[in-house]
Image (spheres, grey):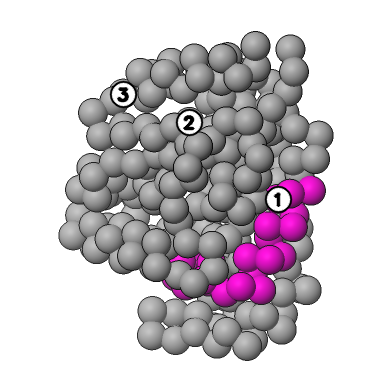
Amino acid sequence: MKKIIIAIDGFSSTGKSTLAKQLAKELGYVYVDTGAMYRAVTYFAMQNHWVSEAHLDKEQVVQNLNKVQLRFQFNDVLGFAEMYLNGVNVEKEIRTLEVSQNVSRIAEISEVRAKLVQQQQEMGQDKGIVMDGRDIGTVVFPKAELKIFMTASAETRAQRRYQELLGKSQKVTYNEVLENVQQRDYIDTHRDDSPLVQAEDAVVIDNSDLTREEQFTKVLALVNQKIR
């Protein structure tokens, strides 16, 4: 069967990565978590004190982008690829609420987006790839054979994210997570460069009331239609 590009976009905490991993495993495709790439750049900026809730030194971030080396390395035990920043596994460090609070601001920077979009496009040259993010179907792969746009209510997404963070022993409150989700939604949809929008030919999946299994079955049927 022919290989295709599957582009999954949508709001934060809609389970894009979970769905993308499921599809990649089922199809034997490469999975690329573009959100992890932006999170890694954010973590790099935080380590160097160029970004915080009250501060963003855009000039320093841009000037030092050449010092950011990103790669995914497959973990056989976990069953998915983890993010490495300059040779160091930062998969755990980039998933904190603190990184979440800063990532949308870093992703707004045009130079950051240009660097990462170029890398992402190179990854998909041979197709057979599942990629999720905010602008995959509109900017990275506008000609992708299948585009999915995922959404759910802010409250539903915040509850999911809250439970996930609690499971990682992070001390957060539901209201903090909800505020972060709403803030990221606003920034993602209002930024000047590549804002989060639904591609005209994308299939919308509202998973507010869907289980992971129901969602996977629904999307896999769409994939099989495109492949055949």
Answer left or right for 125 relative to 206.
right
User: Which residue bears the numbered disc 2?
Assistant: 19
Image coords of residue 214 (percent x, y): 35, 18
Comparing labels 2 and 1, the label whose residue is closer to the camera: 1
Seen from the viewer's position, the closer of residues 167 and 189 is: 189
Q: Is residue 114 magenta?
A: yes
Q: Which residues are magenta?
A: 102-122
Q: Amino acid at mark 3?
A: Thr
Give the vertical position of 160 relative to 117 (above or below): above
Picture coordinates of residue 160, whole percent (x, y)? 29, 42
Looking at the rendering, which quadrant does residue 40 occupy? bottom right
Q: Residues within 10 Å of mark 1 (few under 14, many from 20)?
A: some
Labels in figure, total: 3
Q: Residue 18 or 125: which is nearer the viewer?
A: 125
Q: Amino acid at mark 2?
A: Leu
Labels 2 and 1: the sequence-earlier one: 2
Please give the name of the residue rendered at 18% of the width and 60% of the height, measured from the top-left corner: 175
Residue 158 is at least partly visible in this image: yes
Please report the residue visible at 49 percent of the width from the left and 72 percent of the height from the top: 192
Residue depicted at 63% across the width and 31% down the height = 145
Give the distance between the C-alpha atoms of the residues marked 1 and 3, in whole angstroms: 29 Å
Disc marking residue 120: 1
Q: Quadrant of the N terminus?
A: top right
Q: What residue is at 71 percent from the left and 65 percent from the top?
A: 115
Give the x, y percent position of residue 126. Answer: 81, 34
| Foreground pick, 106 / 187 | 187
Q: Earlier in the sequence, mark 1 or mark 3?
A: 1
Q: To which residue does mark 3 refer?
A: 211
Q: Residues within 10 Å of mark 3 (few under 14, many from 20)?
A: few
In the image, residue 197 lies at what x, y percent? 44, 53
Q: Quadrant of residue 124?
A: top right
